[in-house]
Every structure is written in C-alpha cells, then in structure tokens.
C-alpha cells in the first residue's frame, strides 16, 4: 500500500462564546502543542469574535487532513478552556 502524502491546509473558524472569554495566547500555545503531537503546523488569529485557525498537515487525502485539523482545534479549545484566565 503505497499512499502518496500531500500537504493540505485546512482552515477552521470557531466563534468565541459570549459569556466565556478564551485567552488567545493560551489557545495559540495549546494549538501549537496539539499540532506538534500530530506532526502538523498551525497558525491562529482572533478576529471579529472568532478564532481562525489554519492547520497544515501531510495526509493521504482531504478527509484525513480535515480529521487531523479538527482534532488539533478541539484539543486546543479544551485545553485553553481549562486554563484559568488572569485578570488584566
């Protein structure tokens, strides 16, 4: 089974919940760790009340790349939500 791996970039956009503020720095750090565990790279930005994340990964197909990207963002959201936000 010789599968050719291609680099895919999957962009995901997650709305920030109104009552719960998510620390963008904590999310970026968590996304970086989650991507590293999956041999992927990640870039994230916060704009207009949304977190926009681009995950690049080598995968045999678009569906596999999307699954990896969703796992990275899901894990980062869970870890960042568990991180207490410091008062400014």
Image: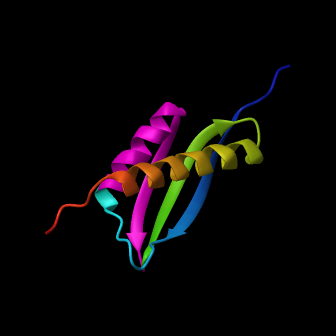
Q: Residue at x 75, y 35 (%)?
A: 60
Q: Which residues are magenta?
A: 26-48
Seen at 38% across and 72% down, the residue is 20
Q: In the image as oriented, which residue stretches furthest toward the left?
A: 88
Q: Residue furthest top?
A: 1
Using the rendered view, name the quadrant where residue 24 is placed.
Answer: bottom left
| The image quarter in which residue 49 lies | bottom left
Q: Nearer the viewer, residue 6 or 30?
A: 30
Residue at point 39% right, 69% down? 46
Q: How many marks overall?
A: 0
Residue 82 image point, x, y percent: 37, 52
Q: Position of residue 83 (x, y in %)?
A: 31, 52
Residue 81: quadrant of the picture:
bottom left
Q: Residue at x 49, y 65 (%)?
A: 52
Q: Is residue 64 left or right of residue 38?
A: right
Would you say 11 lies left or right of 4 here? Answer: left
Q: Quadrant of the C terminus?
A: bottom left
Which colouring convention does the figure follow?
rainbow
Frontmost residue, 86 versus 2: 86
Residue 29 forms part of the magenta stretch: yes
If the image is split into quadrants, where does the N terminus sit? Answer: top right
Q: Is residue 66 above or below residue 14?
A: above
**Horizontally, is 57 left or right of 53 in the view?**
right
Q: In the rendered image of this protein, does residue 13 appear above or below residue 70? A: below
């Amino acid at each position: 089974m010789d599968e050719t791996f291609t680099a895919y970039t999957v962009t995901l956009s997650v709305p920030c919940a109104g009552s719960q503020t998510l620390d963008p720095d904590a999310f970026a750090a968590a996304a970086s760790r989650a991507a590293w565990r999956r041999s992927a790279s990640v870039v994230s930005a916060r704009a207009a009340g949304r977190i926009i994340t681009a995950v690049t990964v080598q995968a045999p197909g678009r569906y596999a790349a999307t699954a990896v990207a969703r796992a990275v963002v899901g894990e980062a959201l869970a870890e960042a939500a568990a991180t207490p936000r410091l008062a400014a």
